[in-house]
Image: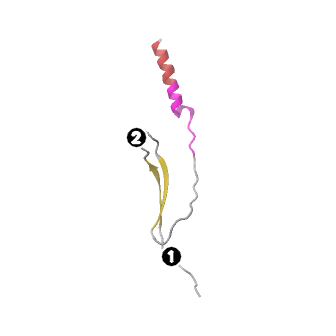
Amino acid sequence: MVDSIVIPNEMKLTIGNKSGGIFRKSIPIVKLENTNPYLSTIDMKNVIIEDEKKFYDRKVFWLGVGLIGGIIIMK
């Protein structure tokens, strides 16, 4: 009769960004490592929190400001 069983394991969770290259956006990564070689992770759930940017934080807004400013300066 087995009363209890213990399997030693430590999980290391790494959250970071992987570089996509010079002109590409970085890719967010979640990596889980087990210290016990006999254990493996089958499934992992993730929650994505999207940060909504303000209108003045977007590149299109600053492109428009630059174009309008350039037209005003040229006249």
> Residue 74, image x and y in percent?
45, 14
In which quadrant will I find the N terminus?
bottom right
Numbered label attached to residue 32: none
Q: Nearer the viewer, mark 1 or mark 2?
A: 2
Determine the CA span between mark 1 and mark 2.
Answer: 44 Å
Q: Position of residue 23 (x, y in %)?
A: 43, 38
Q: Which residue is mark 1?
A: 7
Residue positioned 56% across, 43% down in the render: 51
Q: Residue at x 57, y 55 (%)?
A: 46
Magenta-drawn stretch contains 51: yes
Q: Crowding at label 1, few (<14), some or many (≥20) Cα neighbours within 10 Å?
A: few
Q: What range is drawn magenta here? A: 50-64
Magenta span: predominant SS is helix
Q: Please, what is the three-letter code of the amino acid marked with disc 1?
A: Ile
Element assignment for label 2: loop
- Image coordinates of residue 62 in percent, x first then y, are 50, 28
Q: Residues within 10 Å of mark 2 (few under 14, many from 20)?
A: few
Residue receiving disc 2: 22
Mark nearer the N terminus (1 vs 2): 1
Rendered position, 48 above or below 2: above
